[in-house]
Image (tube, rainbow, N blue to C red):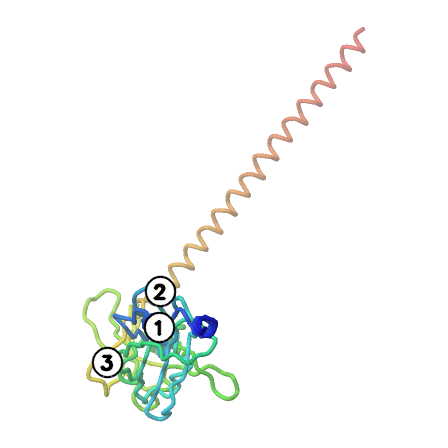
Amino acid sequence: MRCPQTVLLLLGTLSCWHPSSAQGEKYPTATDIRWSSINLKTILDWSPKPTNYTYTVLIRGKYFKDWKKKCIFTTDTTCDVSDLMKDPKDTYDVRIVSEIRSPDGIEESPYAEGPSFTPYEETIIGKPVIRNFTLNKELNTLTVLIRDTPTPYRFSNNTPKTVRDFFPNDFTYTLFYRKASSTGKKQQSSDTNEIVIKTDKGEDYCFYVQASVPSRKVNRMSQNSDELCTSSDAGGFDIIVLVAVGIGVALIVFIIVLSVILCKRKNRKNEEKSKEEEALNAA
């Protein structure tokens, strides 16, 4: 009889069976793959949310041909790939693999490819921040210092690389300014993070900063920084002085009132004591 051999063959086949390969089962591939990058911090997003499988992100640049893995076996639909994109001028390809944790890793998993991405041309320049400013009334100048925005990358000495470090000859700050009493606007640009303008004597100024990458055709300009005015600090100082004076006056008034009350109480006690002594003497 050949039945025992048939049973053994069937059991051997079942022992090699894996859920991912049953009936050629394939998991859904990623859709709507999107890049978002601000100041060279680059994130990938996609859909849908996985149920009984996971995702692994693969990144490949022109300068390194092998696919590099990121966010391995993740159940999220977002992945920070900044550390794989250290050369902003390189163009990167992406694959998102749909898979399960297979012990043998033999089965080829389905994947979806997203659009290519070149950080140098496509990362958005974030909103700049004015670190401080100085209005010199003797020299009639306004000096504005802008904070260079850090990126996720660092130099060999572990100091952070800024956005301007990645665009050494292709990055500009522009200061837009006006007299506080006027709406007429002027501008002055600089390749450094310090801008100095001439001012009129006795005038206050309001200003904001914009960063730009002049060589770009799209995404050239950043958002505007918050607008500041040279009178704001003085106004703030005046408010602090007024509050301090008010507190001081209130404290003085409180001390005077308390002194008067204590003095009256003491006089009242002395009067009562004198009356008691007079009554005893009369008796």
Would you say 108 lies left or right of 188 here? right
Question: Picture coordinates of residue 87 (x, y %)?
Answer: 37, 88
- For marks 3 and 2, the one nearer the N-term is 2
Q: CA distance from mark 3 to mark 1?
A: 36 Å
- Residue on which disc 3 sits: 220
Report crowding for label 1: few under 14, some 14 to 19, many 20 or more residues within 10 A (C-alpha).
Answer: many
Residue 10, by quadrant, is bottom left
User: What's the residue type where badge 2 is placed?
Assistant: Pro
Residue 195 versus residue 75: which sits nearer the camera? 75
Label number found at residue 50: 2
Q: CA distance from mark 1 to mark 2?
A: 9 Å
Report crowding for label 2: few under 14, some 14 to 19, many 20 or more residues within 10 A (C-alpha).
Answer: some
Label number found at residue 98: 1
User: What's the residue type where badge 3 is placed?
Assistant: Arg
Of badges 3 and 2, the one in the foreground is 2
Badges 1 and 2: C-beta atoms under 8 Å apart? yes
Label number found at residue 151: none
Badges 3 and 1: C-beta atoms under 8 Å apart? no
Residue 202 versus residue 49: which sits nearer the camera? 49
- For marks 1 and 2, the one nearer the N-term is 2
For the residue labelled by badge 1, is the local secondary structure a helix, a strand or a loop? Answer: strand
* Residue depicted at 27% across the width and 78% down the height: 114
Question: Picture coordinates of residue 241 (x, y %)?
Answer: 46, 55
Q: CA distance from mark 3 to mark 2?
A: 37 Å
Question: Picture coordinates of residue 221 (x, y %)?
Answer: 25, 77
Would you say 83 lies left or right of 182 here? right
Residue 267, by quadrant, is top right
User: What's the residue type where badge 1 is placed?
Assistant: Ser
Q: Is residue 235 above or below residue 22?
A: above
Question: Picture coordinates of residue 118 (x, y %)?
Answer: 29, 84
